[in-house]
Image (cartoon, rainbow, N blue to C red):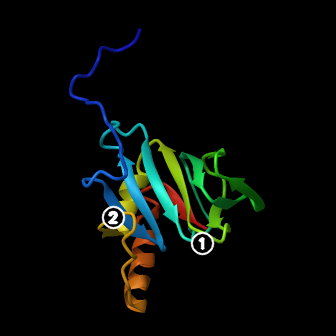
């Protein structure tokens, strides 16, 4: 039996150009929080990721599924130690618990959509990153002490958000 409709939940229309979109700068990337876990009752989140040439996170793993659709450029995913170059138009799924990371190797900015299910990665990024004014805003210029503080915070909160840096 399908449960009754929940009228407390509303339709979500996500547009990265909407002025109310939250943008986060993290490790040189700019992430637009298109659909948050708060909007989906924790079922998933959708993040528009703008990754400069050479950008990407360190190796990590987490206990939730992560799906990426490459919109522009090409991204090199390292999955369980094996490299895979993924071009615009392709979608990949990273299974829960699998070691991985990605790097923009296209020589130009890249862009991809990232869906995490269940949600939580959106909240983690908002807690460890820096809010910026928009998709083209430069990342904040952080001192070495500030960068070290961000790394410590990311490590401290990783377990709370079911993640592990490798």
Give residue 12's mark.
none
Report, in whole angstroms, how far the alpha carbon at label 2 lies from the one at label 1: 19 Å
Q: Which residue is depicted at the point 51% across and 58% down?
A: 163
The spot of residue 161 in percent (x, y) is: 43, 56
- The residue drawn where x is 25% and y is 53% is 20
Quadrant of the rendered image containing residue 110:
bottom right
Q: Percent from the top left, x then y, of residue 148?
A: 43, 84
Residue 109 as seen in the image, left or right of residue 40: right
Q: Quadrant of residue 65?
A: top right
Where is the C terminus found, in terms of image quarters? bottom right
In x, y percent, where is residue 64? 53, 46
Rendered-image quadrant of the N terminus: top left
Q: Which residue is mark 2?
A: 134
Disc 2 element: loop
Of the image marks 2 and 1, the number of the one nearer the N terminus = 1
Q: In the rendered view, tell whether residue 97 sits above or below residue 135.
A: above
Q: Residues within 10 Å of mark 2 (few under 14, many from 20)?
A: many
Quarter occupied by residue 60 = bottom right
Q: Label 1, on which residue? A: 53
Q: Is residue 148 left or right of residue 55?
A: left
- Towards the viewer: 30 or 145: 30
Residue 11 in the image, given as x and y percentages of width and height: 29, 31
Q: Is residue 140 above or below residue 87?
A: below
Q: Badge 1: few (under 14), some or many (20 or more) residues near its Cα, within 10 Å?
A: some
Tell how many labels: 2
Residue furthest to the bottom in view is 144
Q: Is residue 136 left or right of residue 97?
A: left
Q: Give the residue at x 60% y 51%.
A: 70
Instruction: Determine the residue positioned at 45% across, 77% down.
Output: 151
Residue 41 versus residue 164 in the image, above or below = above
């Amino acid at each position: 039996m399908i449960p009754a409709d929940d009228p407390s939940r509303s339709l979500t229309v996500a547009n990265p150009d909407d002025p109310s979109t939250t943008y986060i700068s993290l490790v040189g990337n700019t992430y637009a929080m298109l659909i948050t876990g708060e909007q989906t009752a924790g079922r998933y989140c959708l993040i528009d990721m703008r990754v400069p040439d050479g950008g990407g996170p360190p190796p990590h793993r987490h206990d939730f599924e992560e799906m990426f659709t490459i919109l522009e450029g090409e991204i090199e995913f390292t999955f369980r130690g094996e490299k895979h170059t993924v071009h615009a138009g392709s979608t990949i799924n990273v299974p829960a618990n699998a070691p991985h990371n990605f790097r923009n190797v296209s020589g130009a900015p890249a862009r991809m959509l990232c869906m995490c299910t269940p949600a939580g990665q959106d909240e983690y990024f908002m807690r460890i990153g820096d809010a910026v004014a928009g998709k083209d805003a430069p990342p904040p210029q952080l001192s070495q002490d500030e960068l070290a503080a961000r790394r410590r915070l990311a490590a401290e909160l990783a377990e709370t958000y079911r993640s592990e840096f490798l």
